[in-house]
Image: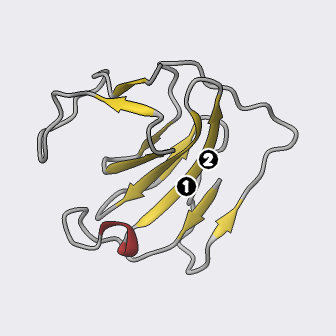
């Protein structure tokens, strides 16, 4: 897991990933292969927390940080909480090309609701 410092800008201010504080988590799934979950903290986001680490950015420093967890087996089941913003912001998910068939109802600028299906693995 890595935390990257950046000035907190609203998530609608381009470029999203270049100017906002973020936590990058890399996962491996037998169903989906490797994937990344990037939590992007924007204006007034107090902190970002994960279930295995707690608050990731307790102090605002201008350097990036990285953690590994060799003494922990971090295993999340479908629907388990992975982390949270201590206010709100944006999550970017990256999958290997073709690993996921995304929800066909998703459209640009349409809100995604808590618990809504993102997609299914390809058979």
Q: Is residue 94 left or right of residue 108?
A: right
Q: Nearer the viewer, residue 4 or 35?
A: 35
Residue 44 pos. (x, y %)? 30, 61
Residue 24 pos. (x, y %)? 55, 55
Residue occupying the point 79% across, 31% down: 73
Q: Nearer the viewer, residue 30 or 70?
A: 30
From mark 1 to mark 2, how far is it between C-alphas?
7 Å
Q: Nearer the viewer, residue 106 or 84?
A: 106
Q: Is residue 115 above or below residue 92?
A: above
Residue that label 2 marks = 26
Residue occupying the point 51% across, 73% down: 5
Residue occupying the point 47% across, 19% down: 123
Q: Is residue 118 above or below residue 8?
A: above
| Mark 1 Cα-neighbour bin, 10 Å: few <14, some 14–19, many ≥20 | some
Residue 78 pos. (x, y %)? 51, 18
Specify the farthest residue to the right.
71
Q: Is residue 99 left or right of residue 115?
A: right
Q: Quadrant of residue 12?
A: bottom left
Give the colour scheme of this rendering.
secondary structure
Q: Nearer the viewer, residue 62 or 33?
A: 33
Residue that label 1 marks = 24
Residue 79 pos. (x, y %)? 47, 19
- Secondary structure category for the residue under label 2: strand
Q: Quadrant of residue 27?
A: top right
Q: Is residue 31 above or below residue 94?
A: above
Tally of marks: 2
Question: Contact, CB < 8 Å: mark 1 with mark 2?
Answer: yes
Q: Is residue 64 left or right of residue 12?
A: right
């Amino acid at each position: 897991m890595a935390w990257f410092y950046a000035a907190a800008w609203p998530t609608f201010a381009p470029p999203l990933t270049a100017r906002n504080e973020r936590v990058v988590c890399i996962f491996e799934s037998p169903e989906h292969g490797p994937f990344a979950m990037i939590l992007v903290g924007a204006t007034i986001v107090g902190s970002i927390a994960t279930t295995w680490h707690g608050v990731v950015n307790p102090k605002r420093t201008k350097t990036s940080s990285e953690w590994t967890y060799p003494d922990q087996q971090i295993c999340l089941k479908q629907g388990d909480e992975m982390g949270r913003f201590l206010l709100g912001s944006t999550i970017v998910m990256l999958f290997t090309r073709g690993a996921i068939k995304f929800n066909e109802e998703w459209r640009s600028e349409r809100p995604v609701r808590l618990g809504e299906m993102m997609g299914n693995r390809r058979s």
